[in-house]
Amino acid sequence: MERLKGKNIIITGASGGIGAEMARLCASSGANLVLMARSADKLEALKAELEERYGAQVNVRLLDVSDTDAVKRVFAEVLVDIGRVDVLVNNAGFGVFRHAHEAPIDEIQSMFDVNVIGLMACTSMVLPGMRERRSGHIINIASQAGKIATPKSSVYSATKHAVLGYTNSLRMETADFGIYVTSVNPGPIATNFFNIADEKGTYVKNIERFMLKPDYVAQRVVSRMLTRTREINLPGWMSAGSTFYALFPRLFERIGKKAFNQK
């Protein structure tokens, strides 16, 4: 990963899960990191680990991406400090599994504020500089849920559909400016995401053997940084399922009905 050496990489939602694993891999490759999340203690612990293990240059910032005023302020400060952003990984996000009629409006609003508006706000802060320099990479962590909507994930799937739509449009807008734009569409990952999304633990119990490991997902993402990669879809069999769904949606929904109702 020589191409990451000396590059400035921002990762949101970096305090745990694949965000923290990506930070470790980037640090081991000689990148300079700006790690953002809402947990000060976890960020500081990760910063200390990366500095001790890899001698990495690590800047940590408290940020709730749903607060767009805070996004503007924090990113403006970071841009002054580091001068340029080579890679932005929009990793912050959360989901809650409920039937559509059970989802409170404030919960719906919060999911869109974090997963969609926050992602767009962060991106908008680094895009002007990337366009001016004609280089950079935007990586948006979406989900297979953005391709295959299932019961009890109507709101979460809607946010990830929005992320994919935004990412695909952004890719075309920036194609002539040397900017790479990648969507990452993983299936279920064994992280704390499900502490909120799956309060009863039913879904995790049903699909535990299929869950992806955070370090594997992180490795796949980091290995494609600063390359012209359109999408990263994990696991392969689920990616094939999303293609089948796009071609034969009615048949796919009928065949997969039992599997879709695992939450």
Image: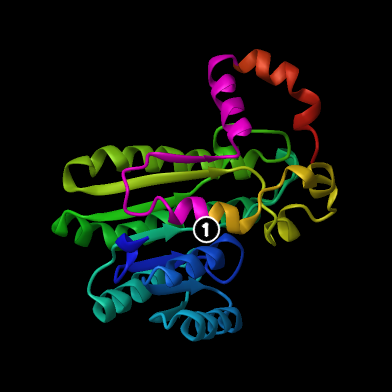
Query: In percent of the image, x 58 and y 77: which residue is there?
Result: 39
Depicted 59 relative to depicted 130: above or below: below
Is label 1 in a helix, a strand or a loop?
helix
Using the image, determine if residue 76 lies above or below residue 66: below
Q: Is residue 237 magenta?
A: yes
Q: Please tell me which residue lies in front, 52 or 97.
A: 52
| Quadrant position of the C terminus in the picture | top right
As drawn, the residue found furthest toward the front would be 2
Residue 142's spot in the image, x, y percent? 51, 46
**Near-viewer residue (193 or 223):** 223
* Residue 166 image offset from top left, x and y in percent: 39, 42
Residue range (magenta): 219-248
> Where is 23 relative to 90, above or below?
below
The x, y position of residue 57, in whole percent, is 38, 81
| Crowd band around label 1 with a 10 angstrom C-alpha radius: few (<14), some (14–19), many (20+) | many
User: Which amino acid type is marked by label 1?
Assistant: Val
Using residue 183 as the reference point, say whether residue 200 is left or right of it. Answer: right
* Residue 262 within the segment the image draws in magenta: no
Where residue 22 sits: x, y (%)?
50, 63
Q: Quadrant of residue 77?
A: bottom left
Residue 40: name its quadrant.
bottom right
Q: 236 or 17, which lies in front?
A: 236
Judging from the image, the colouring scheme is: rainbow
Quadrant, the N terminus:
bottom left
Q: Residue at x 50, y 79 (%)?
A: 50
Pick the front one: 71 or 46: 46
Q: Circle 1 sits on which residue? A: 114
Label tally: 1
Q: Residue at x 83, y 53 (%)?
A: 201
Left or right: 173 in relation to 195: left
- Which residue appears at 62% of the width and 57% of the height? 214
